């Protein structure tokens, strides 16, 4: 059956613009286009949501649908109604040339009694950029465990017409369809993200290579976080572009999440080259910082880390926002730290005050990161901050106020589409559906019974082993591996190296603080420790007494390591055996893992 293409022209005069001009201050950008379409609703109906008016897109009810039900957590505008596509459908917007935010809103529901799992959508912009391809709303909402979602893109419109074409992806299937609940087109300032020749960006890990983000590159917003603060919804976004800033809590990684310093009454100024609409003032008034340990020496043992899941095979623009909220930090070299992206150095000795000029002054740093292709659809993008001790700053700490991450299209294929998450992964995140509840409960009861019996059996076995074979000692073992080579005071030299007291080992690891765990070794947990007030760093492996490897195996290992000397291998420095603890400490070259 031949499919026809339907085109709808959308011309909207923004009657609120005069009001916005009257209310805007010098820190607010007023968009020349501020279009919000409530898809599937009657065009004569104007509804207010998120600080703006949403207009319907149709004069009649052809190819529109209403969600059978919608929970209280889902806004009715624009998610109650939807435009349904069984063939290519094009929206045309009259605009002025320049960069634009384009946002699509989706709520998965059985519109017109159709199976939402059959809905796969492709979207192109002006026959140039592929924004979405074979996109499943159902799979993505399941994967991220959210009831609805919004996809935001940034493209440069060179002409006076913006065309957005929606198509069902599986054109040969009779039951396939696509839908969209809302569309936004919002203008944005020139040069906010597209810098091109004026401001080339560092390509992390490829120094001195630079990357140019010009008008022929499209972007997809993946993360926009108010670090250390609460969510900022579009109606409270001071930039004037109706942006959403999420809290960063779900993305903080590790046992030590730091503290959240803030100064909500602070007057926010802006560094040279940073426009006042770069971020809301509240983003710069809140932050996440390392914990204020005594003298900050403990902070040298770990990173302040965020973890983001991104699509494989793309480049990413990472924008980091900084602003010192402590009015006492007024001079350079008081807080200096290193910035790492995907385990590569983006900025070795970043001093915010040196760039901003003082507290309360906002600034941002832009970097481009390459995430290589992989057999996995998604990979982890790491952001780490670590105190930079070489300059001997007053405080060993680091902090961050905001972060934005954008996926970049290539200049050649102009494609931003990624793969859908696996259905198996989605189901594992959300759990099993209600119709299987009885089976689940029965399985859980059986599993709990088996687990309880197993635990009791293990405990009885351990007690028997303790009583019957008291001489059989499964010794907890500790390996000490130097991360930075420095002189360590040697005590009672032995064939295996220097002997270290258990008291020093506990002091180096804050009595084996779980926050300092950096891995699991063959004998047990691996801790990061430090000696001589942070002058020497070590990796300490503390064995589990339940391990099958005992004293004989441990002696064999350190005996073997003590005879090795190679620039790619660690060399043994010493050990300790006190209170049924064994320690061996090994030197390591300054740039590498413990091997």
Image (cartoon, rainbow, N blue to C red):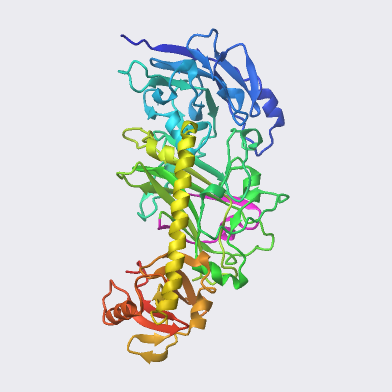
Q: Is residue 268 above or below residue 180?
A: below
Instruction: Please say whether residue 194 is visible from this viewpoint.
Output: no
259 falls in the magenta region: no
Q: Position of residue 507 (x, y in %)?
A: 53, 78
What is the total number of numbered labels drawn onto the structure image? Answer: 0
In the depicted view, which residue is nearer to us: 17 or 301? 301
x and y percent of residue 309 in the render? 43, 45
Question: What residue occupies the far right of the structure in this picture?
Answer: 265
Q: Which residues are magenta?
A: 343-366
Residue 364 visible in the shown view: yes
- Image quadrant in which you'd find residue 559: bottom left
Position of residue 97 relative to residue 386, above or below, is above
For residue 253, side relative to residue 136 (left or right): right
What residue sits 40% from the left and 57% below the top? 343
Q: Quadrant of residue 66?
A: top right
Of residues 6 and 179, the one drawn nearer to the viewer in this rendering? 179
**Is 345 included in the stretch rendered in magenta?**
yes
- Between 167 and 126, the residue placed more toward the observer is 167
> Does residue 476 appear to the left or right of 322 in the view shown?
left
Residue 438 at what x, y percent from top left? 48, 36
Residue drawn 43% across the image and 62% down it: 457
Q: Quadrant of the N terminus?
A: top left
The answer to whether 85 appears left or right of 236 in the picture is: left
For residue 502, above or below residue 360? below
* 403 relative to 373 in the view: left or right: right
Residue 561 drawn at (x, y percent): 29, 78
């Amino acid at each position: 059956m031949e499919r026809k293409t339907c085109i709808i022209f959308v011309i909207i005069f923004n009657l609120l613009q005069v009001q916005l001009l009257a209310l805007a201050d010098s820190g607010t950008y007023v968009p020349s286009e501020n279009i919000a379409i409530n898809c599937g609703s009657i065009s004569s109906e104007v509804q207010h949501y998120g600080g703006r008016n949403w207009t319907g897109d149709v004069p009649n009810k052809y190819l529109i649908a209403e969600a059978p039900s919608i929970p209280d957590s889902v806004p009715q505008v624009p998610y109650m109604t939807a435009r349904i596509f069984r063939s290519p459908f094009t929206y045309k917007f009259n605009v002025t040339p320049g960069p634009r935010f384009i946002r699509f809103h989706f709520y998965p529901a059985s519109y017109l009694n159709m199976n939402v799992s059959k809905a796969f959508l492709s979207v192109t912009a002006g026959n140039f950029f592929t924004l979405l391809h074979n996109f499943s709303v159902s799979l993505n909402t399941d994967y991220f465990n959210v009831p609805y979602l919004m996809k935001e893109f940034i493209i440069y419109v060179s002409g006076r017409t913006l065309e957005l074409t929606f198509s069902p992806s599986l054109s040969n299937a009779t039951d396939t369809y696509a839908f969209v609940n809302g569309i936004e087109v919002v203008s944005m300032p020139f040069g906010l993200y597209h810098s091109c020749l004026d401001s080339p960006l560092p390509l992390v890990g490829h120094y001195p290579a630079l990357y140019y983000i010009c008008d022929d590159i499209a972007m997809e917003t993946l993360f926009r976080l108010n670090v250390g603060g609460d969510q900022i919804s579009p109606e409270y976004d001071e930039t004037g572009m109706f942006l959403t800033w999420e809290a960063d809590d779900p993305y903080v990684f590790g046992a030590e999440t730091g503290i959240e310093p803030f100064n909500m009454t602070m007057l926010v100024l802006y560094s040279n080259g940073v426009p006042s609409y770069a971020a809301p003032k509240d983003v710069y008034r809140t932050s996440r910082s390392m914990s204020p340990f005594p003298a900050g020496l403990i902070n040298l043992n770990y990173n302040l880390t965020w973890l983001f899941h991104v699509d494989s095979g793309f480049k990413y623009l990472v924008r980091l926002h900084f602003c010192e909220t402590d009015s006492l930090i007024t001079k350079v070299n008081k807080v200096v730290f290193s910035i790492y992206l995907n385990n590569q150095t983006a900025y070795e000795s970043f001093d915010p005050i040196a760039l901003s000029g003082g507290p309360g002054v906002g600034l941002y740093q832009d970097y481009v990161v390459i995430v290589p292709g992989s057999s996995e659809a998604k990979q982890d993008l790491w952001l780490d901050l670590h105190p930079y001790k070489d300059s001997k700053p007053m405080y060993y700490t680091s902090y961050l106020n905001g972060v934005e991450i954008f996926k970049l299209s290539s200049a050649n294929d102009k494609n931003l589409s990624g793969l859908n998450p696996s259905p198996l992964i989605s189901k594992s995140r959300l759990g099993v559906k209600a119709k299987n509840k009885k089976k689940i409960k029965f399985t859980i009861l059986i599993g709990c019974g088996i687990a309880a019996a197993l635990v009791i059996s293990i405990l009885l076995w351990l007690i028997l082993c303790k009583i019957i074979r008291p001489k059989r000692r499964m010794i907890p073992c500790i390996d000490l591996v130097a991360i930075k080579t420095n002189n360590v005071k040697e005590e009672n030299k032995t064939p295996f190296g220097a002997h270290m007291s258990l008291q020093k080992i506990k002091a180096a690891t804050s009595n084996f603080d779980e926050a300092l765990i950096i891995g699991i070794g063959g004998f047990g947990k691996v801790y990061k420790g430090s000696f001589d007030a942070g002058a020497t760093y070590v990796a300490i492996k503390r064995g589990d007494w339940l391990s099958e490897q005992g004293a004989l195996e441990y002696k064999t290992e350190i005996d073997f390591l003590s005879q090795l000397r190679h620039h790619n291998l660690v060399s043994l420095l010493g050990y300790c055996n006190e209170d049924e603890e064994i320690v061996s400490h090994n030197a390591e070259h300054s740039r590498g893992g413990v091997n």
